[in-house]
Each structure stands twice: as C-alpha cells, then as structure tokens.
Image: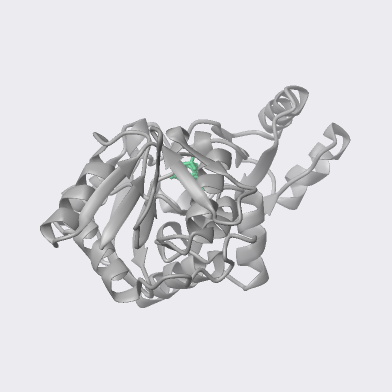
Amino acid sequence: MKIAVLSRNPRLYSTSRLVEAGQERGHEMVVIDTLRAYMNIASHKPQIHYRGEPLEGFDAVIPRIGASVTFYGCAVLRQFEMMGVFPLNESVAISRSRDKLRSLQLLSRRGVGLPVTGFAHSPDDVPDLIQMVNGAPLIIKLLEGTQGIGVVMCETQQAAESVIEAFMGLKQNIMVQEYIKEAGGADIRCFVIGDKVIAAIKRQAKPGEFRSNLHRGGSASLIKITPEERMTAIRAAKIMGLSVAGVDILRSNHGPLVMEVNSSPGLGGIENTTGKDVAGLVIQYLEKNVSPHRTRTKGQG
Ligand code: ADP
C-alpha cells in the first residue's frame, strides 16, 4: 500500500514509529506536512497538491492532526476522503471528538458513564451550576485545553465561583465537572483499534497534583483493566465513530467514567510502557480494512 501520514513533524515519536512500522511491513510511507497540503476544492476531480505536485496513488491516510490545526487538518483529510483514499479515522469523527462538550453529549446520549458535567454561559447561573455538579471540590476545564492545561481544581465554592467568573470574563468556554476523588490522581488510557482494546496503561499524577497527564509529570505503568472498562472504552470509540482512539477513563466508586476520547492518541507512552508494537497493529488494521471509497461520509459531514 501507499500510505500518507498527515503530520506536522516526521520526527515526532508517533509519526516516526508509524512510518517505521509501515515500511517494515512493505508499504510505501509518505509523511505529509498537514499545513503544506493545499487543494482545489471546486475541481470536478478532487486533488491535493504538495510542494508543487499533485498527490496521487494513495490507498490510505493516517491522520495525526494536532489540536491547534484541527480545522485545516480536517479539511485536508476530507479532501483525501473525496479522492477515495481510506482514512484511519474519518474527518467527521475527528472534528466531533475535538469538541469536548459535544463528545460528552454524544456519549451520555448512549448511556456511557461520565463524570457529572455542567455548562453555562451567563455568570448569573454560576452558583446554580455549581450546585448542579454537587458543589466543591470540583474541576473546571477549558473546552479548548489539551495536555492538562486549562484543567483547574477548586476546593471551595468561593474559589470555584471566582475561577468560573474569571474564565467567563475572558470569553473562554468552560465546563464544570464533579471531582472524582477516589480516582486518586490516576486515569486509565485504553488504546482502541477497531473493536479491541489492544493496550492499556495507568497514568498516575505526581505527588501534589491531580492531573495524570504525562506532559504534567505523570508516570505510566501497566494495568489490567476490567471487562467493564474494556467494554466502555470500545463503546466510547464506536459512538464517536473512531476506528483508532485513546479513551481516558477514571475509576470511580460507581464504575468506569469516560473523561475523553482522543482521536490522535500518542504512541510513545503506551508502546514504552507495554512493550507492544502498537504502530504495527495500526498498520495491520489498515491492511485488513482498506478499500477505496469506503468512507461512510465521503467527506460530506
Ligand atoms: P486534557 O484533555 O487537557 O488532558 P483532561 O480532561 O484529560 O484534560 O484532564 C487532565 C487530567 O486531569 C486527567 O488526565 C485526570 O487525571 C484529571 N482529571 C480531569 N477531570 C477529572 C475529574 N472530573 N476528576 C478527577 N480528575 C480529573
């Protein structure tokens, strides 16, 4: 197969591992800088140009679209879909997953366990919003945040009101969430490919921190997940329409709660902790599923 990897940087761990795994399995791998691909959207024959040449002959595309380039990256991916190239994850599913609130609404509609979460626009509604999520301590999240930045814990009602008002004053969209204390600063990252969790790790926050993000100094270790956690992760990815996803789960007193479904999950933490060839499994998934013009939405979403 000829496989495009949409990525801003070929030296990133995940990108280079996917290229290596594809080449090992005899495929032609081409890294395309997402922001340097350009296209004629009005043409009868959809095309993408790159460094002065049209991109041709691709069987599959692996999107590794960073949060900061979601809009343009999804447009490029949609163009690949219109050309009949098989996407590992579809553009519609990726843009859906990048909206944290929409994602939680989709998951809750299908009965997936989630932390109690509230959302409001007017500062006048803040006190009631806080009551709605069972009061302090609580978590406030910027909707556009990633890697734990913009996730704040407020221990008292007063602190929560001040922080929410400050974010609202800055015209930032936020959500307010119950704090899952019993998770003990840990979460579980389940790496889903197709209808399987192929690897899972536990991420533990450093002492004095509640955010377990590896970027915030968290540490990763092996974990055996329960059948309920496995089923929850697979369902969450499926509801989001993602073939490959990193599903982040909190262990609560009343079962697994999904925090987030990530459409470009990093390979570094999971491969290094589990020793599994996750990149190879991603390529194998493409080998089994690739076929031209198979995108459900044909880039129309
Ligand atoms: P980001 O997308 O920026 O990583 P997350 O929503 O994943 O933001 O939150 C970052 C970290 O904060 C999580 O990995 C988890 O450890 C912790 N966290 C987030 N929400 C909660 C919550 N409701 N209760 C307890 N811990 C939480």
**Residue closer to the observer: 149 or 8:** 8
49 versus 180 height, above or below? above
Q: Quadrant of residue 171?
A: top right
**Residue closer to the observer: 22 or 292:** 292
198 versus 138 height, above or below? below
Q: Quadrant of residue 52?
A: top left
What is the x, y in percent for residue 223? Answer: 25, 60
> Which residue is pictured at 80% across the width and 38% down the height?
126
> Which residue is pictured at 49% across the width and 31% down the height?
149
Figure quadrant of the N terminus:
bottom left
Left or right for 92, reference 66? right
The colour mode here is: one colour
Observer able to see residue 166: yes
194 versus 158 height, above or below? below
Observer able to see residue 207: no
What is the x, y in percent for residue 195? Answer: 38, 75
What is the x, y in percent for residue 271? Answer: 20, 52
Q: Quadrant of residue 276?
A: bottom left
**Residue closer to the observer: 74 or 38:** 38
Identity of the residue furthest to the right in this view:
124
> Which residue is pictured at 61% across the width and 56% down the height?
44
What is the x, y in percent for residue 43? Answer: 61, 50
Q: How many marks?
A: 0
> Which residue is pictured at 24% across the width and 34% down the height?
11
Figure quadrant of the C terminus:
bottom right
